[in-house]
Amino acid sequence: MALFGNKKTSPVAKPVAAKKKAPVASKEDAVSMADLYGSSPVAKKTSVKENKAEKKMAKIETAKVLVKPLVTEKASYLASQSKYAFIVSDNANKIEVAKAVKAVYNVQVIKVNIINMEGKAVTRGRIKGRRSDFKKAIVTLKKGDTISIYEGV
């Protein structure tokens, strides 16, 4: 009993055709996916206004990642080793920091180290308080690249 109609079966089995092997393509005939579909799989047409808006949003996002450069004695010493310190947003990661430094300062970033700094307990007279926690990033640049943060400080 079939649920969706009668099932037709024949008592004589049909011979199975032999599988043909696909011809092996030579290296000359091989075509890459990039050649077939171009450099990008989907070509998107954008207007000039959309491009400007995307660039503006990218600058805003990088500005949100980098809060300010950290100007201390230790940071100025690190600058001589092509390492620069920044205070970054609390939810920034190494990749976002590297992209933001590259976009803002137009330098090549090799390495990013991130440190979560706890705020210190402070006392002003009888009032006790605490400084805010922050995140610090130490960015190592390609040899020869510099950022002019510490000039005149």
Image (cartoon, helix red, strand yellow):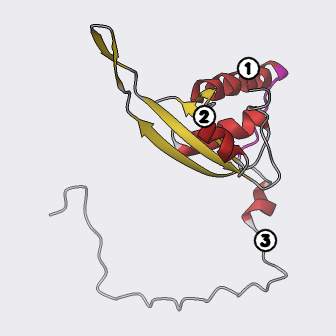
Residue at the extreme left of the image, as rendered: 1
Closest to the observer: 6 or 62? 62
Residue for point 19% across, 61% down: 2
Q: Amino acid at mark 3?
A: Val
Q: Nearer the viewer, mark 2 or mark 1?
A: 2
Residue for point 77% across, 35% down: 105
Q: Earlier in the sequence, mark 3 or mark 2?
A: 3
Main SS class of the magenta portion in the image = loop
Corner quadrant of residue 96? top right
Residue 86: mark: 2
Q: Amino acid at mark 1?
A: Ala
Q: Earlier in the sequence, mark 2 or mark 1?
A: 1
Residue for point 41% across, 87% down: 14
**Disc 3 from disc 2: Cα separation:** 47 Å
Q: Nearer the viewer, mark 1 or mark 3?
A: 1
Where does residue 56 sit, x and y in percent of width and height? 73, 21
Above or below, 109 relative to 44: below
Contact, mark 1 vs mark 3 (Cβ under 8 Å): no
Corner quadrant of residue 64? top right
Q: Which residue is mark 3?
A: 31
